[in-house]
């Protein structure tokens, strides 16, 4: 699978500080999926038109099946990632944002200020799932992997459990996850034998 990770930050893109969130996305996804997937990396400022143009290019030209963003999802005036994502959407997938906020609320009451969205972008011969993740590295791992108890049992499913099946449904590659990191879910009729 071809995956794009996009960090949206005025200061990180200007070199004021290092991007920690984008690499965290890649770390978690490589642990969940294994090393054979290709990553396309972008680090850009919080400019709505630039974000939308970048997302279109990653889907339509680079042909990524999964595009994951971090940053720009709060209520501040420069937080425009959800608007830019919705501008390139063909379908909205509200369950992803709802679940991310549910997970984050277990840690901070300000999770209700988060505006993450997930959408599908579809062309005649390609489709992609785009997901806005939180901006904090710790929250990225929590929302992707879910909440686990001290014995490693899942208390609250992370959003990545649904991503492989969603990618199947939109015509992308069949992908498996490392169950110790995140166990993907598919209906029995959609599971392929190895």
Image (cartoon, grey):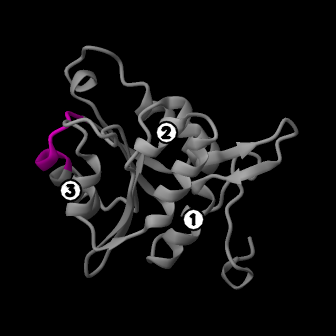
Q: Which residues are magenta?
A: 44-51
Q: Nearer the viewer, residue 50 or 97?
A: 97
- Could you give the CA–CA distance between mark 2 and mark 1, rounded to whole angstroms? 16 Å
Judge the density around disc 1: few (<14), some (14-19), many (≥20) Cα neighbours within 10 Å.
many
Q: Is residue 45 found inside the magenta-colored segment of the image?
A: yes
Label 3 CA crowd tier, 10 Å (few <14, some 14–19, many 20+): few
Tag 2: Cα neighbours inside 10 Å, few (<14), some, or many (≥20)? Answer: some
Outermost left residue: 49
Magenta segment includes 9? no
| Secondary structure state at the residue bearing disc 2 | helix
Classify 169 as above or below 133: below
Percent of width and height locating residue 77: 19, 37
Element under disc 1: helix
Observer-nearest of 90 and 184:
90
Residue in the image at 53% along x and 74% along y: 168
Residue for badge 1: 164
Q: Residue at x 49, y 41 (%)?
A: 111
- Looking at the image, which residue is at 41% across and 34% down? 135
x and y, in percent, of residue 89 in the image: 27, 67
Q: Measured along the vertical axis of the image, is residue 175 above or below residue 4? A: below
* Residue at the disc numbered 2: 26
Identify the mark nearer the N-term, 3 or 1.
Answer: 3
The residue positioned farthest toward the right in the image shown: 151
Query: Spatial distance from mark 2 to mark 3, Cα to Cα?
Result: 20 Å
| Residue to which mark 3 is pinned | 57
Residue 191, position as x, y percentages in the image: 70, 77
Residue 44's place in the image compared with 114, above or below, is above
């Amino acid at each position: 699978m071809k995956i794009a990770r996009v960090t949206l930050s005025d200061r990180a893109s200007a070199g004021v500080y290092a991007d920690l969130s984008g690499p965290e996305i890649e770390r978690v996804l490589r642990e969940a999926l294994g090393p054979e997937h290709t990553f396309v990396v972008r680090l850009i400022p919080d400019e709505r038109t630039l974000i939308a143009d970048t997302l279109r290019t990653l889907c339509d030209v680079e042909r990524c099946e999964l595009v994951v963003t971090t940053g720009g999802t709060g209520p501040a005036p420069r937080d425009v990632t959800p608007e830019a994502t919705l501008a390139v959407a063909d379908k909205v997938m509200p369950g992803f944002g709802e679940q991310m906020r549910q997970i984050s609320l277990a840690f901070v009451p300000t999770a209700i200020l988060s505006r993450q969205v997930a959408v599908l972008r579809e062309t005649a011969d390609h489709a992609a799932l785009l997901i806005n993740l939180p901006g904090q590295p710790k929250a990225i791992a929590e929302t992707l992997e879910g909440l686990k108890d001290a014995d490693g049992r899942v208390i609250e499913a992370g959003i990545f459990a649904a991503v492989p099946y969603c990618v199947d449904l939109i015509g992308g590659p069949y992908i498996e996850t490392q169950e110790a990191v995140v166990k993907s879910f598919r209906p029995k009729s959609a599971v392929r034998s190895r």
